[in-house]
Image (spheres, rainbow, N blue to C red):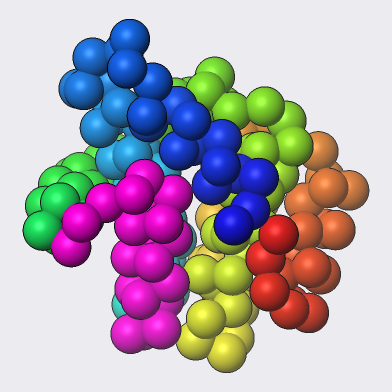
Amino acid sequence: MTDWFRHLKSIVNRRDEPAADRQALARAAAVVLLDLAAADDDQAGEELELVHAAVRDAFDLEESELAELISQADALQRQAVSLHEFTHDLRTGLSAPERAELVEWLWRVAYADGRIDRYEEHLMRRLADLLGVPHEEFIRRKHQAASGPCG
């Protein structure tokens, strides 16, 4: 399990936070991942499977919980005018290394269908900027995602 997923689990599993806050962070991560999967207007099965696996593992969700969360995130992603709200939550909730790890997972979703579309590349650059990930880290994570398993 990656450090990013461990950190997200620790945030989600904090008992002193309202359940709504934990769910909001889970939805924010799912929205960003789903938005990238939809960037090339072709949500390949491999991309969606990776999004589901990432969210399920990061937040220790049962299949029924996962289905509901992904459904909510999908609706939010389709209605969203901007990703700023979601990336802000992730930027404030994750450390710099964890945000870089998220960027690597986003690259893995982009690579899941075997190619990087120009719209995916553009969105990746925008997301990295919104998440506060420096360009050289962005490029390093792109190469890591292209070369093998995450983490």
In the image, farthest residue toward the bottom: 114
Does the segment drawn in magenta span residue 32? no
The quarter holding residue 107 reads: bottom right
- Residue at image position (33%, 9%) is 16
The quarter holding residue 121 reads: bottom right
In the image, farthest residue toward the right: 136
Residue 1 at x, y = what percent?
59, 57
Magenta stretch, overall SS: helix
Q: On the rendered structure, is 103 left or right of 43?
A: right
> So how many labels did they put on this image?
0
Q: On the rendered structure, is 137 left or right of 107?
A: right
- Residue at image position (67%, 66%) is 150
- Residue at image position (21%, 22%) is 19
Question: Is any atom of residue 75 visible in this view?
Answer: no
- Viewer-proximal residue, 14 or 86? 14
- Viewer-proximal residue, 118 or 34? 34
Question: Is any atom of residue 137 visible in this view?
Answer: yes
**Which quarter of the image is occupied by the C terminus?**
bottom right
Residue 117 at x, y = what percent?
56, 77
The quarter holding residue 118 reads: bottom right
- Viewer-proximal residue, 80 or 100? 100
In the image, farthest residue toward the top: 16
Q: On the rendered structure, is 49 left or right of 65?
A: right
Residue 29 at x, y = what percent?
41, 44
Q: On the rendered structure, is 60 left or right of 111?
A: left
Q: Which residues are magenta?
A: 44-63
Residue 55 at x, y = what percent?
37, 54
